[in-house]
């Protein structure tokens, strides 16, 4: 089925009984077709924070937690976000013998939908710490040209083009859900080793996503591929921390080298 046939953007009754078949997988391959030869496009993780998790213990008492899902970029499918929200809400009135039983059930169901093993870590509701972004913020740069849709020709090397290793970030990433048109906001981190990137050109490129329709994971992969193909770094990492919508935030990361895979963080705006 296409994503247009999913529950996204439709009025939906929230299930009150455990309903694993509500999960809606979306193939990654169609969006990746143009980047299939880019090194690292299938290397990395998607981390999801799920803030609306609840189930019943054996005494019928509600349990609550925050979940962090780890979905490998090698998985053939991502999972459509509204179906994931409805799946977790379907468990609100379901009894599990233990937290471990609940966790094992979720990991089995999500792994089946994604076509690859998914891990879930559970945190107490006041346990996740807020992290400050690391690197150089480029949001004060003044690009000479702005576009309304992603344009890789905006990317350029710095005039000196010396060899460097550095991490830049911007809070100005914005794109739209390709089905509902709702805006998605995020902070994007770019770590690279190679000839120095022109910060103003990189900011112009990030801003060009403001009217782009694409899922979070697809936007990160397009950013990664455009930088890799146009600026030829030796090593590259692109990591976006998107703000929460519907009780979920999505945080995809792609890396050219596995040793550059980051530890997942949570920013204040999430």
Image: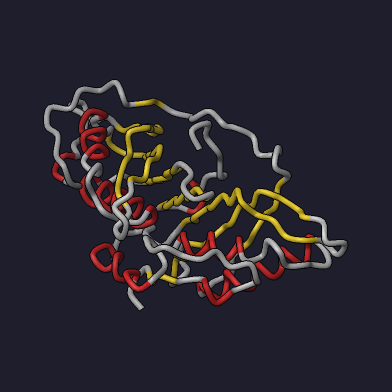
In the figure, is residue 156 to the left or right of 1? left
Is residue 195 positioned above or below 4 on the image? above
Q: Residue at x 65, y 67 (%)?
A: 106
How many numbered circles are shown? Answer: 0
Where residue 121 sits in the image (x, y, percent)?
Answer: 67, 54
In terms of image quadrants, where is residue 138?
Answer: top left
Name the foreground residue: 156 vs 30: 30
Q: Residue at x 52, y 45 (%)?
A: 262
Name the foreground residue: 221 vs 196: 221
In terms of image quadrants, where is residue 55?
Answer: bottom right
Q: Residue at x 26, y 29 (%)?
A: 199
Where residue 236 sits in the image (x, y, percent)?
Answer: 38, 46
Residue 131 appears in the figure: yes
In terms of image quadrants, where is residue 131?
Answer: top right
Name the foreground residue: 58 vs 261: 58
Quadrant of the image for the N terminus?
A: bottom left
Where residue 24 sits in the image (x, y, percent)?
Answer: 46, 71
Name the foreground residue: 134 vs 181: 181
Specify the color scheme. secondary structure
Q: Residue at x 65, y 58 (%)?
A: 120
Is residue 117 positioned above or below 51 on the image? below
In the figure, is residue 124 to the left or right of 153? right
In the figure, is residue 27 to the left or right of 159? right
Where residue 12 sits in the image (x, y, percent)?
Answer: 46, 65
């Amino acid at each position: 089925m296409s994503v247009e046939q999913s529950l996204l953007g439709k009025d939906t009754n929230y299930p009150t009984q455990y309903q694993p078949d509500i999960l809606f997988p979306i193939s990654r391959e169609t969006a990746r077709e143009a980047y299939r030869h880019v090194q690292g496009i299938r290397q990395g993780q998607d981390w999801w924070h799920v803030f609306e998790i609840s189930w019943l213990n054996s005494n019928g008492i509600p349990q609550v937690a925050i979940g962090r899902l780890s979905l490998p970029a090698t998985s053939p499918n991502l999972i459509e976000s509204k179906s994931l929200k409805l799946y977790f809400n379907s468990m609100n009135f379901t009894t599990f013998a233990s937290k471990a039983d609940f966790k094992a059930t979720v990991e089995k169901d999500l792994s089946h939908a994604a076509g690859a093993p998914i891990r879930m870590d559970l945190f107490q509701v006041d346990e996740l710490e807020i992290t400050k972004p690391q690197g150089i913020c480029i949001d004060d740069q003044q690009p000479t040209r702005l576009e309304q849709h992603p344009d890789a020709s905006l990317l350029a090397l710095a005039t000196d083009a010396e060899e460097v290793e550095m991490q830049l970030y911007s809070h100005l990433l914005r794109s739209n859900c390709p089905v509902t048109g709702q805006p998605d906001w995020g902070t994007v981190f770019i770590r690279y080793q190679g000839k120095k990137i022109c910060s103003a050109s990189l900011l112009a490129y990030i801003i060009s996503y403001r009217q782009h329709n694409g899922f979070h994971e697809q936007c990160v992969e397009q950013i990664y591929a455009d930088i890799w193909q146009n600026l030829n770094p030796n090593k590259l990492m692109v990591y976006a921390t998107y703000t929460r919508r519907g009780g979920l935030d999505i945080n995809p990361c792609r890396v050219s080298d596995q040793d550059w895979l980051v530890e997942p963080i949570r920013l204040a705006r999430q």
